Amino acid sequence: MQGCDERAIDGEAAMKPLIGEQRLAGSARTNARRMRAAGGTAPGARQRGVALIIGLVILVVLAMLGVSAYSVATQDERLAGNARDHARAMDAAQTILRACEAYIENNAPAFNGTNGFLAPPSNGQWWAFSASNSSAPWSVNTVPFNLLPTMLALQNAANPPDWMTNPPQCIAEAVPPNLPKGQPTPRGMLNVAHVAAQGYGINSTTVVTLETYVAYY
């Protein structure tokens, strides 16, 4: 009988952990049901939801940073391109301005309205800059390249400057006894001409205009 009692006691002792585990499992299920009934969420699910929101916020911030960096890089590239095009137009205008000056000094052309050498303006405004002088547009009254050895050589070169795709232009006008603004002109033995030049970039809207006065005998 004693052996039977010992086995019974051992059986009861072995059953106690099982009963405790069942009670814990039942309690957990009861708590989960209560939380669902109350509209709650398990702690693990809440943590996963917060991690998802944080990840989405980080992705949005990274996307905004990428767009901002791309916009800055694009703007810098555009500014650099505009600066290069302006330098190209400036180079073209300076080149043809010097070529026109040299031709006038060496040849003393007649300012009679041909080949871009215009008579003094009668209305007190330079032909090259007056909108009212529509009879003398740049496209018509410009000094041709065949009179300018420097420009002709550049035009016929094996590797001409890229600004020759839109060639620069110059107009020369004889200076009357008084400048258009009324200042006296120191003429003496010299003749004076007003020279205006325009250079263009690859972009048709990039235009550089220069002007100077050249004295010649």
Image (cartoon, rainbow, N blue to C red):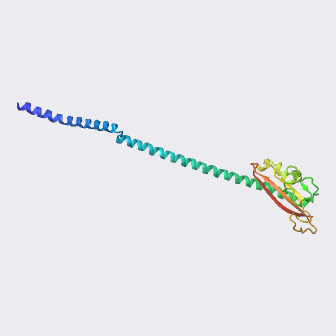
Quadrant hosting residue 98:
bottom right
Q: Where is residue 47 in the image (x, y as percent from the top left)?
A: 38, 43
> Relative to residue 47, is residue 118 depicted above or below?
below
> Relative to residue 19, is residue 97 depicted above or below?
below
Classify residue 148 as left or right of residue 3: right
Q: Position of residue 184 (x, y in %)?
A: 89, 68
168, 164: nearer the viewer: 168
Residue 161 visible in this rendered orientation of the protein: no
Q: Position of residue 32 (x, y in %)?
A: 31, 37
Residue at point 15%, 36% (across, down): 13
Residue farthest along the left direction in this orientation: 1
Q: In which quarter of the image is the N terminus?
A: top left
Q: Position of residue 190 (x, y in %)?
A: 92, 66
192, 151: nearer the viewer: 192
Residue 48 visible in this rendered orientation of the protein: yes
Q: In which quarter of the image is the C terminus?
A: bottom right
30, 110: nearer the viewer: 30
What is the count of numbered marks?
0
> Relative to residue 106, is residue 17 depicted above or below?
above
Classify residue 33 as left or right of residue 89: left
Quadrant hosting residue 15:
top left
Residue at point 59%, 48% (across, down): 70
